[in-house]
Amino acid sequence: MSEVKKIAVLPGDGIGPEITQEAVKVLQQVEKEFGFSFSIQYGMIGGGAIDRVGIPLPPETMELCEKSDAVLLGAVGGPDWDSYPPELRPEQALLGIRKGLGLYSNLRPVTLFAGLENSSTLRPEVLAGVDLVVVRELTGGIYFGDKERTTTPEGEVATDLLIYHEFEIERIVRLAFEIARGRKKRVTSVDKANVLESSRLWREVVNRVAKDYPDVQVEHMLVDNCAMQIIRRPATFDVIVTENMFGDILSDEAAILTGSIGMLPSASLGEGTIGLYEPVHGSAPDIAGQGVANPAAAILSAALMLRHSFGYEAAAAAVEQAVRTVFEKGVRTPDLASENQLAVSTEEFGDLVVEELRRTEWPIEETA
Ligand SMILES: NC(=O)c1ccc[n+]([C@@H]2O[C@H](COP(=O)([O-])OP(=O)(O)OC[C@H]3O[C@@H](n4cnc5c(N)ncnc54)[C@H](O)[C@@H]3O)[C@@H](O)[C@H]2O)c1
Ligand SMILES: CC(C)[C@H](C(=O)O)[C@@H](O)C(=O)O
Ligand SMILES: [Mg+2]
């Protein structure tokens, strides 16, 4: 019997609870198939927590995360809380967990599953061979620099400081090179070095770190050009490494290479094995409560948890394979279905993944 892994589940707002439920269902099936043992504890976060206790990240939620082996999060935010003061916004909770747990690296794999090239708004021939990962710096940059608001005779003035320390750049860039070594050995470092001083420092650090990885090909690309090349020739990218805000924007754009934003999972990691796993998408208030959200990103995030926090590689691959098989059988959620295609609900999709896990014989290997 393997040791019990403690998982904190924070469903959050909007579609968060709907998609998280499916990911938990899949994790519970993984327990049965592979003989693992997960202790799942729920916590409140975001708008729901504001409504109940007045703050987006209650101390007990942070404590729950700290004493867990991994955190699975749905999404936070929504129009109900958009006019709240900055420190009371639901999104602040997410930033608080990332910073509080020291999760400076955010991996956003962009995988195109067979058949889904027809679900994208891009042409299938442009998408052939797409397989990249965005490595986003997650605890620095403009998100965490000082913010100020002052009233002057000329009117309101607002500032957000974009600040990077050399060590913050170095550790994420090094990770990107390491990841590239296990893939196609190509790193694209994305910056705005023609304008921003922080980007010029970023580029210097990349050039220095690159010397330790002579086997990895490195290129620098300005972010505006990258935004264009990602949809022009996406299959030529392997590892994209970039700062916090550029990574946020480019990864939503890259999601369309997979058919839908509902497909993109993420893993946020630091120095230890604890990680935060969440879909790249948000709380999707426009479709919340209808049972139509695509839970694949949440389920695939759970697979990343199995891989990165627990070292359960076979189980992670099994979940990914189960999702792949469900799509291969032609199953589509509404975001991926064409007009005349019948779509399944959030819950039905989760059930089908569970069913795939159940009917396949999986090799029982690790009990790390
Ligand atoms: N990790 C997070 O918690 C997170 C991430 C991004 C945005 N947000 C928050 O979510 C709220 C809404 O943000 P937004 O509308 O800009 O982005 P969003 O990602 O929530 O939605 C953008 C569009 O994508 C669709 N979509 C998103 N996820 C989907 C899924 N799983 N299946 C099918 N369709 C899906 C939505 O219906 C919407 O049309 C905001 O409050 C924002 O701050 C939270
Ligand atoms: C909700 C928001 C704070 C968050 C971010 O910008 O990091 C989200 O967009 C994401 O991509 O995880
Ligand atoms: Mg985002």
Image: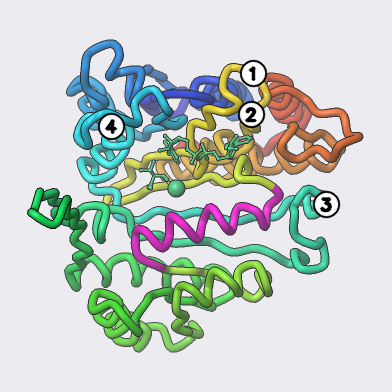
Q: Earlier in the sequence, mark 4 or mark 2?
A: 4
- Label 2 CB, ligand 1: below 8 Å? yes
Start-end of magenta stretch = 242-259
Indicate left or right for 199 with 131 as reference: left
- Residue located at (44% from left, 83% from top): 220
Foreground residue, 145 or 350? 145
Amino acid on which the number 1 mark rests in the picture = Gln
Tags 2 and 1 touching, CB below 8 Å: yes
Kindly state the secondary structure of the residue where label 2 is placed. Answer: loop
Label 1 sits on residue: 290
Estimate the spatial distance between the alpha carbons at disc 3 and disc 1, rounded to whole Å. Answer: 24 Å
Kindly state the secondary structure of the residue where label 4 is placed. Answer: loop
Estimate the spatial distance between the alpha carbons at disc 2 and disc 1, rounded to whole Å. Answer: 8 Å
Amino acid on which the number 2 mark rests in the picture = Ala
Instruction: Provide residue 299's location: percent of width, then percent of height.
Output: 58, 34
Foreground residue, 258 or 285? 285
Label 2 sits on residue: 293
Tags 4 and 2 touching, CB below 8 Å: no
Q: Earlier in the sequence, mark 4 or mark 3?
A: 4
Magenta segment: does it hold 25? no
- Label 4 CB, ligand 1: below 8 Å? yes
* Callout 3 crowding tier (Cα within 10 Å): few <14, some 14–19, many ≥20: some
Label 3 sits on residue: 118
Label 4 sits on residue: 89
Specify the quadrant of the image occupied by residue 210.
bottom left
Q: Earlier in the sequence, mark 3 or mark 1?
A: 3
Amino acid on which the number 3 mark rests in the picture = Asn
Instruction: Provide residue 190's location: percent of width, then percent of height.
Output: 43, 74
Is residue 312 visible in the rendered image? The answer is: no
Q: Earlier in the sequence, mark 2 or mark 3?
A: 3
Estimate the spatial distance between the alpha carbons at disc 4 and disc 1, rounded to whole Å. Answer: 24 Å
Instruction: Provide residue 146's location: percent of width, then percent of height.
Output: 13, 54
